[in-house]
Amino acid sequence: MNPSRRSVIRSVSLLPIVGLAGCGVLNSNQQTETEQSDQGNQNEETEAKTETETVQETTTETQQQAQYSGLANQTGKILEEIEWFGTSYFNAIVRYKNLVGRLYDTTEYLRRQPELSESDLSRLESTANEFVTLLEETLAPHFENSEDFTATADILFQIESRVDTIRRFSERSDTDRVESELTSLRIYLDNIQRSETINERFSERPIHEPLLEYATSSNYNKSHPFTFIIAHPETEYVAPVRSRKRHNVELGQVRFETKLERRNYISDLENIFGGVSVEQDRTGRGFLAAHPRETNQPTRLIDIQRFSSAEAAEQARGTFLDGAVSSEGMTELGAYEWEQIHYFQVLEVLDPHSGYVVFREDEGMTFNDDGDIIREDSGELGNPLEDYSRDLIGDIVYAYAKRVGPYLITIAPSMTAWEERDRLDRKPLEPLKKIWFWESLSESKTESG
């Protein structure tokens, strides 16, 4: 049988079946088409719902990031100040001294001249302008210029005003007035190049404004004994930060006068925050220790890590959560939610008198209902031992963490669990209320400032 005949017979043999099926087959086809249509509509609805949820999630995340942008910006300012003092302060002061010296020498030279030429005046103005630029661009952003105290504004005014006066009277050939102005300028320059003047205007032991303003909330009062210690691990720089109204900066066992003491101090901080330390894509790091200097308020330690991007910071958070760090959900501290984390840390320190990492003596121990030891939440993680011996192997460190923009912030590490901190006749949150991250951007004084 040829292929064409076989095709005809097959077609004919199918006709009765089709006839018997009648409308049933058509209905089945219609139902299939309807189901496909419904399925298509359902898929479209699902896709639309998914897109809506995605948009909502994106919107929520965007809103959160907008809310956190103020916190991220403020955190960035603080870390930048820590980095500037660690990397640039001493060079800036050396330049200041050199330029004041050059301006002083130029003034003294011109004062001995019978009259000033145009080149003499240009030389004076050029040196003065270089000094003014240093004041405006390098020093002024990092030191206080307010109604209470001025570090650079009055110097700028005096230098510019006096140099302008010298030119004006020189062009009038008023040599007596020019000599008088040069003498007055020389005396002024001699005063501002003295060590005591420099230490007062550009103090870094302790540091004052604007870093203190950046690091505190509106709950802080300049009359409080509250003192920060900042540390920049890259340069092993350590310095206190406090109000000019407070003259006593004694901080118990905390020492950082010598290079070895500063190195040991930073080693302790790196050790305490070891569980959350991530080096990949990290572009900067700084520590702060908030010392309330109140008997019932603990010291609180803060670790700021900056990464190359917000995505890199989130990856860093994922890195430590995939490692030794465990999370127990979120809790509210002030205006923001923080992640409760804990990690096992081998607490090995170089200096037993650093003041942060040691066990309490027996009388410092308290016990919970199960009879287990609760380490006192002093913020110092114990009192320093009198001798150098150390029996520390390791312990669980409890802390709070938050990622904002490219920053990972970890605060308030303690061997005491979060829920047990307020049982020890202390005020564990009081120090945090005075720190910049306690308030939202809309509430904080930094927005209005």
Image (cartoon, rainbow, N blue to C red):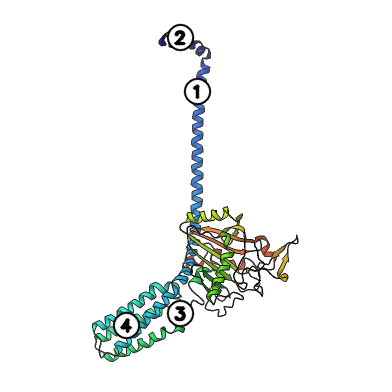
Q: Residue furthest front?
A: 389
Which quadrant is the N terminus positioned in?
Answer: top left
Pointer 4 with pointer 2, Cβ within 8 A? no
Q: From the image, tell me which residue sits under label 3.
A: 201
Q: From the image, tell me which residue sits under label 2.
A: 9
- Label 3 crowd bin: few (<14), some (14–19), many (20+), radius 10 Å: some
Q: Residue 378 falls in which quadrant of the image?
A: bottom right
Residue type (three-letter) at the residue carrying disc 3:
Arg
In this view, the mark in front (4 or 3)? 3
Q: Secondary structure at mark 1?
A: helix
In this view, the mark in front (3 or 2)? 2
Dot 4 or dot 3: first in sequence order is 4
Residue 276: percent from left, percent from top: 56, 59
Residue type (three-letter) at the residue carrying disc 4:
Val
Residue 182: percent from left, percent from top: 32, 87
Residue 240: percent from left, percent from top: 53, 74
Residue 181 appears left or right of 334 = left
Dot 1 or dot 4: first in sequence order is 1
Q: Secondary structure at mark 4?
A: helix
Pointer 3 with pointer 1, Cβ within 8 A? no
Residue 119: percent from left, percent from top: 25, 82
Numbered tag placed on residue 163 in the rendering:
4
In this view, the mark in front (4 or 2)? 2
Pointer 3 with pointer 2, Cβ within 8 A? no
- Label 4 crowd bin: few (<14), some (14–19), many (20+), radius 10 Å: many
